[in-house]
Amino acid sequence: MLYLPCDLCGGTDVRFLLACERLDGPLVRCRQCGLVYVGERREDFTFSRFDPERSRRLAERVRALELVDEEVEAREAPVRERVMAERLQWVQRFIASGRLLELGCAEGTFLKLAARAGFHAHGIEPDPVTSALARQCPDIVVFPGTLADAQYPAASFDVIVLFHVLEHLDSPRRTLHELHRLLRPGGILVIETPNIASLWFYLLGRRWRQFIPDHYYFFSPATLTRLLEESGFRPLALTHPKRIVSLRLLTDRVRRLSPLAGRLLMRAITRMGWEARTLILRPSDVLLASAAKT
Ligand SMILES: [Zn+2]
């Protein structure tokens, strides 16, 4: 069967890795550069444009796969703010102020923190419901649409950030090319994305938590570094981000692996009243990279 060509090197010599009902198609690996990606798109839930019908189908798929517990997610807001604060600290290691753009800013939680810290905070969000929420905040400027629609002039920004967006894109290479144009010389790019070169993927295989219907690209330190370099960036740092998680969320993720274990654990932590207690983890299956425009 013929798979989609590799977005990183253009190669067509591609090896089948696995099939997983939580992905939109077969997982493949490029034999030339090692990029792992979804080699065929049955639905195509990539973020190339906003299509309400497609969003509805995606939400339906996520519901059918029981990936999200709405009640758990709704209670996670305070922890999410702390996660955003950690991300901001990472950005501030490389740049302290200036014009910042977040691609895929959702309801603007990170941007509000960035604005409070002194950045001129801009965002792009194609989903009309979340972008409308973000646009209610007076301190941030949010464009409701896609990067292609926004049409910013060259060198508009000092720093651009993508937190768990790269793996959703139609073409990471094309997007990074455009982001390179939007950054001023020496400007900073920050990317957080799943790491396929992690023990968790090898241990869990098709049950790995990063396999969800709208993830299409799974980078490793090697393929992410190559993407950055070939898009005109000089890598500055690559790490696994710290992650603050509540026991409630951790239990919910256990539930995805084993519904019975998840239920028992949830009952135990509810009895103890520990749902909101937090732990600091450093999951090796996520990459956080910074690079400078050359
Ligand atoms: Zn390749």
Image: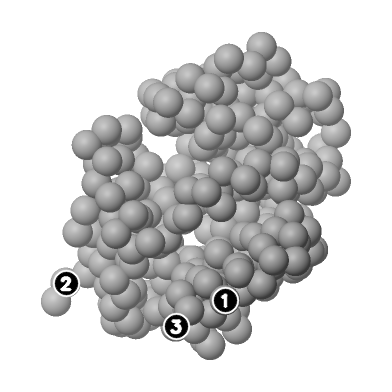
Compare residues 117 and 70 and report the one nearer the observer.
70
Residue at the (45%, 43%) spot, across then down? 175
Return the x and y of residue 72 as percentages of the image width and height. Answer: 56, 52
View extreme (bottom): residue: 203
Tell which circle, 3 or 2, labels the residue nearer the N-terminal end.
2
Compare residues 75 and 224 and report the one nearer the observer.
75
Q: Is residue 276 above or below residue 220?
A: above
Place residue 195 in its image quadrant. bottom right
- Helix, strand, or loop for circle 3? helix
Return the x and y of residue 36 as percentages of the image width and height. Answer: 42, 71
- Compute the Cα span from label 1 to label 2: 44 Å
Question: Quick check: is the Cβ at mark 2 less than 8 Å away from ligand 1?
Answer: no
- Compute the Cα span from label 3 to label 1: 24 Å
Give the mark toward the camera: 3 or 2.
3
- Helix, strand, or loop for circle 1? helix
Return the x and y of residue 99 as percentages of the image width and height. Answer: 71, 24
Tell which circle, 1 or 2, labels the residue nearer the N-terminal end.
2
Question: Quick check: is the Cβ at mark 3 less than 8 Å away from ligand 1?
Answer: no
Q: Which mark is residue 60?
A: none
Q: Is residue 266 above or below residue 108?
A: below
Residue 54 horizontal side relative to residue 218, left or right: left
Q: Which mark is residue 264?
A: 1
Tell which circle, 3 or 1, labels the residue nearer the N-terminal end.
3
Compare residues 191 and 10 and report the one nearer the observer.
191
Q: Give the quadrant of the N terminus.
A: bottom left
Amino acid of disc 3: Gly
- Compute the Cα span from label 3 to label 2: 23 Å
Amino acid of disc 1: Leu
Q: Which residue is mark 3?
A: 205
